[in-house]
Amino acid sequence: MGCREVQQKIDLLARQEVTSSERERIENHLASCETCRQSLKRLRDLEDVLAVLPTPPVPEGFAARVVVMAGQQAAPERSTEKLSSSTPNRMRLAAGTLAALAAGLLIGLFMGHETWRSGGQRSPVAAGQAVDLLAASGFESLVDPSGDSLAQSYLSLTMAADR
Amino acid sequence: MEQHASDETLMQAVAGGDLAAFEKLVLCHQESVWRTAYRMVNCRQSAEDIAQRAFLRVFEARKRYRPTAAFRTYLHRIVVRLCLDHLRKRHPVVTDDLVPVDDRSSPELRAIDREQAEAVQKAIGRLPSKQRTVIVLRYYEGLSGAEIAAAMETSPKAVERLLARGRKTLETRLGRFFSK
């Protein structure tokens, strides 16, 4: 065992925390190494010097204060436990409500989309009614009587103007 | 071992909400917890705060506590974490005056003791936080290398290295007080 290892284990030796084989190896090393013997002496001196530092007393009433705080901590925990026993039902109710709202929103969006898509494909009756309204408004020239798209009407107008 | 069994029995009772059992635990370990915190942070107010929080954490975790290690080690782990957190957040300045040394027969002896105690307090206070931790747990709380490793959540080898470095520094700073 080298000096470095002995130096690290010297503290354990002083406190009887080494195995018997380690103790034997350390003591064999110490028998022939003045440097490590001096290290062991310094360790013991250090322990004596450190022991001089006085120990301050525990603050008065410390335990009582801690127990009171623990008791205060325990009281809200007991209330929370009662509350949390109904939490699963509340969560289910909230989840159900959200699901219903989401479904309603989706249905609404779908219907709106369908309405938008079917906006250019009105029934002939509806189309005819729209044409009458246009005639009454004076914009009948914008409507092709054959019922074609507004684009066709525009083209008809522009071609007529070119002529 | 008997103390360990007793702590375990008390913790079981605490898990069931028994505050009287919790008080017994506090009374049994308050000195060690307080001393460790005080030596680490060198301020009575901060040390008391840390010590209180350590016990309250034990209480908060009472239902989750499992005796995988000795209760004392478990408690020291909490104290060490709180102390290291405190030191990380603040400068480790020595703020408290020394507690008066024991009364001796002569003023000269009291003066020598006081000078030595101040030097020790200052030297420990200047150690890096992890070296300070191992020195305090070793030389003031008497924890074994394995217990210190468990409290610091590190390896016994790392503890040995920290102890060796901490001792070397203290020997340099306090060597003048060693016996010739």
Image (tube, coloured by chain):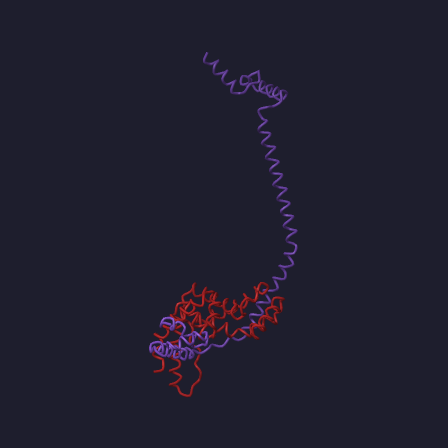
Chain colours: A purple, B red
Residue at 61 percent of width and 35 percent of height: A108
Task: Choose between A131 and B44: the one closer to the eye.
Answer: B44
Q: Is residue A163 above or below residue B140?
A: above
Residue at 62 percent of width and 39 percent of height: A103
Task: Choose between B27 and A120: the one closer to the eye.
Answer: B27
The picture places residue B43, in percent across and down from the top left corner, at 45, 71
The picture places residue A46, in percent across and down from the top left corner, at 39, 77
Residue at 55 percent of width and 70 percent of height: A66
Task: Please identify the residue farthest to the top as the structure is shown.
Answer: A163
The picture places residue A90, in percent across and down from the top left corner, at 64, 51
Using residue B91 as the reference point, say whether residue B4 is left or right of it: right
Task: Choose between B63 and A11: the one closer to the eye.
Answer: A11
Q: Count of labels shown? A: 0
| Quarter residue B174 falls in | bottom left
The picture places residue A41, in percent across and down from the top left corner, at 37, 79
Task: Please identify the residue farthest to the bottom as the structure is shown.
Answer: B105
Using residue B65 as the reference point, say whether residue A161 is left or right of it: left
> What is the quadrant of the N terminus of chain A in the image?
bottom left
Task: Choose between B121 and B144: the one closer to the eye.
Answer: B144
| Quarter residue B157 falls in | bottom left
